Amino acid sequence: MKKIATIVGAAMAVTAAAGVNASTLDSVKNRGALQCGVSDGLPGFSATDSAGRWQGLDADFCRAVAAAVLGDAEKVNFVSLTATERFTALQSGEIDVLSRNSTWTLTRDASLGLNFAGVNYYDGQGFLVSKDLGVDSALELDGASVCIQSGTTTELNLADYFRMNGMSYEPVLYDTSDQTTAGFEAGRCDILTSDQSQLSALRLQLSNPDAAVVLPEIISKEPLGPVVRQGDDVWFNIVKWTLFAKINAEEMGITTVNAEEMLSSDDPSVQRFLGVSGNMGELLNLENNWAYNIVKQVGNYGEVFERTVGKGSPLNIERGVNALWTDGGIQYAPPVR
Amino acid sequence: MEKFTPIESRPAPLVEVGIIGWMRRNLFSSIPNTLVTLFTAYMLWIVLVPFINWAFISSDWFGTSREDCSSGGACWVFVTVRWNLFMYGFYPEDSYWRPNLAFILLIVTIAWLSIPNLPFKKWVGIAAITVYPVVAYTLLYGGFGLEVIPTHRWGGLMLTLVLALIGIVAAIPIGILLALGRRSEMPVIKMVCVIFIEFWRGVPLITILFMASVMLPLFFAGGTDADKLMRALIGIIMFQSAYMAEVVRGGLQALSKGQFEGADALGLSYWQKMNLVVLPQALKIMIPGIVNTLISLFKDTSLIVIIGLLDVLGMVRQALSDPAWLGYPAEGYLFAAFMFWIFCFSMSRYSIYLEDRLNTGHRN
């Protein structure tokens, strides 16, 4: 089975490389719109609001790329993709960039003919516990019963974590994530484990969300980021630096609101960043105000984070490891110079 | 001698007629019957009363945000604020008249064909299968001066109907041809038909949709943007025609051999025999089977969710992940179920109506 998967993967990579050789940047410019692959519904990452507009961290990344390349954040065609077809859609050229909570792993990076352009959100497996339990840390969970979705990597991570810390637990297995939540709600288990970004959404679906709390511990690495096709380095650079620009903007304190007055800043690094001086945009084959457009129209990383999944959203996820490196997190971007 | 005066006829005793009589006869005729009746009534009571209370009495219907859902029952606001999305998907709002017009035209055509004694039936029928598809395609997709609206913006109930209708309209003729081919005495034609039918019938629809959306694009030259909806649609048509072929074959076999031989004896050609003698009788027998297949096709269209096309069910699921509206799955799924039920039930009533109209007394 593994062998077949490898062969199919390799065949896909070859076909993809042979098939799509036109420059992605040119085709986006000719089309006048970015084809962006998003998930078919994940709270806070990509979901439509009641007006039919795509909202979320992943959806806003699509807008940032469109702002950088086309100067207009609204020139995006969102293509909703399921987990199975997401990479094919990218390989076959149906989309230009995939921004769909995809975990960056070696296998995917090396064998699918794709490149991960960075990490938009550091996710990881976490725990949801009911407040009655009075637990503040996952290390106090010895002997707890845990609701898990069977057959997922979540199950393995959990076993590893508890064994490593010399604790015991009693698994309660379910088939789907809905059933898992229902089981937790019905009190069949003390804790529920899943990716932390999803726990916040699951918590809101409980009949009394305030009775449960997400613990701070993360026990696995799930770096989520945008993906592009291999072999088009111009486009790869653009997508990569769109992400870096959002992070750099937050570090320099440039926001949607103050972007315009920052244009007259004396700070040479801000000037370079916003395209007032230097030729940073040209080097990326973009307009010189590419980063200004991103920040002005979409916002810096922190703004987008708080608006979509953070304090400004119902999900209320803490910045945690997704804070800037200067604030104790690990979001770090190379300098624009 | 006293004159015989007949007693005035009196109405039957109250306990024997009307609703009470009916209940005595049907619900309380014996002790076991009475027990079953009471038990059923109790079950209905404990299920229906809370449901009606939840769905209608203490429910919220109007508003714009989840704060408007305060009465504790069903939050139908979730459905009403997204009504347009559930109906049209991401179709641009100022073009809603286009699918509306296409739908109204369709209803008018169907009504014209099914109401007896209206004139020009033949011409309307011909227009329905030749002109209407072009008109509908132009209205929905664009062209001839209308703005082009790419299929990835289609969704909701509109997409469900498009898939089901095209699937149905294309599958019936292909299915008839395949069935005739399978009964043919020409070995090559017969073999091709058998292989086609057995291949498509032997594969689950999900697999076909996956192949259409995941594998197929890899075989195209880069940049060839074969429409995802088109790919899915071709898969659905192939799948359904194989099923339809077997239903038609069943109908053909139900016809007595005498009909075929009689037509042959009259010197009719193959196509005359089929058109004038065999198919009119066979198709009538097949109506329940055909409608059965059509209803299942209608429901199967919701499988396209797995390839990221958002039909009415897909739009509902999509809406469930809006952070501002988390936690209303029951309302969403009930709404989707109700939509499907309306269309499937109408189809089944229409088939019963057709059967009655075409009934020539052979049914027993």
Image (cartoon, coloured by chain):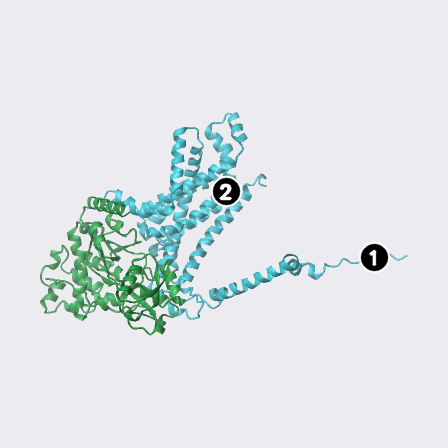
Chain colours: A green, B cyan
Residue appearing at x 42%, y 59% in the figure: B333
Q: Which residue is mark 1?
A: B5
First-in-chain label (1 vs 2): 1
Q: Position of residue B46 (x, y in %)?
A: 53, 65
Q: Secondary structure at mark 1?
A: loop
Callouts 1 and 2 on one subunit: yes
Return the chain for callout 2.
Answer: B
Q: Secondary structure at mark 2?
A: helix
Q: Is residue A32 visible?
A: no
Q: Is residue B284 above or below residue B81?
A: above
Q: Which residue is mark 2?
A: B287
Q: Position of residue B231 (x, y in %)?
A: 33, 45
Return the chain for callout 1.
Answer: B
Q: Is residue B41 above or below residue B151?
A: below
Circles 1, 2 touching at the beta carbon (< 8 Å) = no
The amino acid type, in three-letter code, at marker 1 is Thr
**Structural crowding at the residue carrying mark 2, measured as other residues with C-alpha within 10 Å and reported as few (<14), some (14–19) or many (≥20):** some
Mark number, residue B134: none
